[in-house]
Image (cartoon, rainbow, N blue to C red):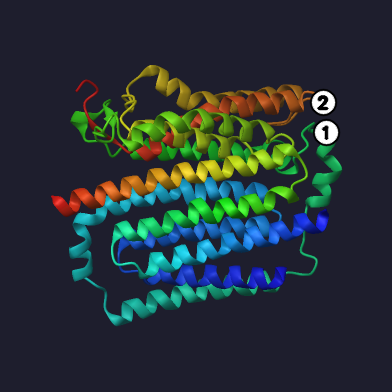
Amino acid sequence: MNFALDLWTLIAVAAGAVFFLAGTTGLLRFPDTFTRLHALTKADNLGLGLVMLGLLPQVDSVVAGLKLLCIWLLVLLSGATASQLIARHTRQSESG
Amino acid sequence: MINLLNIGLAALIVGLACWTIVARQPFAAVVGFIAYGLLLTLVWVQLYGIDVALTEAAIGGGLTGALLIGAAARLRGTDAAAAAERPGAPARWLAAGVSAAVTGALAIGVLSLPDPAPTLAHAVAANITSTGVGNPITAVLLSFRAMDTLLEAIVLLFALIGVWSLTPDHFWGGRPGLPQQADSNGILAFAARLLPPIGIVAGIYIFWVGADHPGGKFQGATILASMWLLTMMAGLTDAPPISRTWLRVWLVAGPLVFISIGFVGVVTAGAFLGYPDGLAKPLIVVIELALLPSLAVILGLLLSGPPQRKAQP
């Protein structure tokens, strides 16, 4: 059972790291602000989500697991808000 | 493995610090500085200095970063002029030399410390029971070295008075900053409605656990102040005119309570800021409770800047 949980942690965290790598590559390589934002939010949403899911079996208590979940949701909220603001600003300055 | 991580972290920080120094654009340098602050937070976590890490994240990275972004935005108009009067090679080499010399002197100082380094940690551990708090950092900040904390709070108040003193005469007593014209149905207003309930709970939680675990009034107050600033930026609330009496009462209440308890200590415990036996913990809680709102209001107004419009628009 422990082995299965450890294996799950390894796979999920590694998959999360892949999303972070892909997101960073996209941030550096994509041509304009909108596609860069698109790449960046994948790292936040999926990358961090997978890391969080992978770490869940390793926590000692339910409260610690809930804290992890809260961190992910807060990062989702801040990432979504910030990229909306950046995208809106870019569109206004391009059209204006 | 952990060593490899630490070496990588250290290399990243030094690299980012260099990049921040050589960045030409003020805004880019500020962004580098904020990222640097967040990486420094990780270093403090690695050194088991969770209290310092929280403070670094809240004040070093977050609050100072926000102040610097404001400064960079204000300096945008002078960018061209500043670039035109680029100092000559001798001046730049002199600046680089002096900075390198300071860094070198600091490095020599740190590296020549005896091993183990001199520490008062044992004295703190031996005497912490007399304070009644469980977090040694809180015991140091509010009992053994309470004077430093008192001066810190007062310095912040002075900084705010310094910012206010930049007010043009005809706006004196008015509202800080420019009016915000955010879309009341926009994403920022949405975040400003959703986030403050969570942020206020988190801020008060961090303040409250400070007695026994990492946390405290400074970190808590920074979170509360940032929630206030968020609602102001989204246009949901407006900055209060600085002439309001209640505002000024909030500003001085914390330091005043701290000083009064200090003077009571002269009579009851025989020393300024001394706590009588058995009363240390309740008095520390009273001081922290009084400082929390004062610090939150001071930090919020510090970031709002000097008044730039009349109290009644």
Quarter of the image where the N terminus of chain B is located: bottom right
**Between marks 1 and 2 in the image, the one whose residue lies nearer the viewer:** 1
Residue at x 65%, y 69% (from the top left corner): B5
At mark 1, the secondary structure is helix
Q: Residue at x 55, y 65 (%)?
A: A18
Task: Give above or below for B38 relative to B250.
Answer: below
Percent x, y of residue B213: 72, 39
Q: Residue B50: x, y in percent?
A: 67, 49
| Residue at (57% x, 40% y) in the render | B219
Extreme residue toward the left, this view: A96
The disc numbered 2 marks a residue on which chain?
A: B
Quarter of the image with the C terminus of chain B is top left
Q: Chain of mark 1?
A: B
Other-residue count near label 1 (Cα within 10 Å), few / some / many at <14 / 14–19 / ≥20 = some
Disc 1 marks a residue whose amino acid type is: Ser
Residue placed most toward the observer, A5 or B280: A5
Q: Position of residue B276 (x, y in %)?
A: 78, 25
In the rendered structure, are the residues bearing label 1 and label 2 in contact, judged by CB atoms less than 8 Å apart? yes
Residues behind callouts 1 and 2 on a single chain: yes
Does the image show residue B47? no
Q: Which is more N-terminal, label 2 or label 1?
A: 1
Q: Which mark is residue B130?
A: 1
Given the image, on which type of amino acid does mark 2 rest? Asp
Residue linked to disc 2: B277
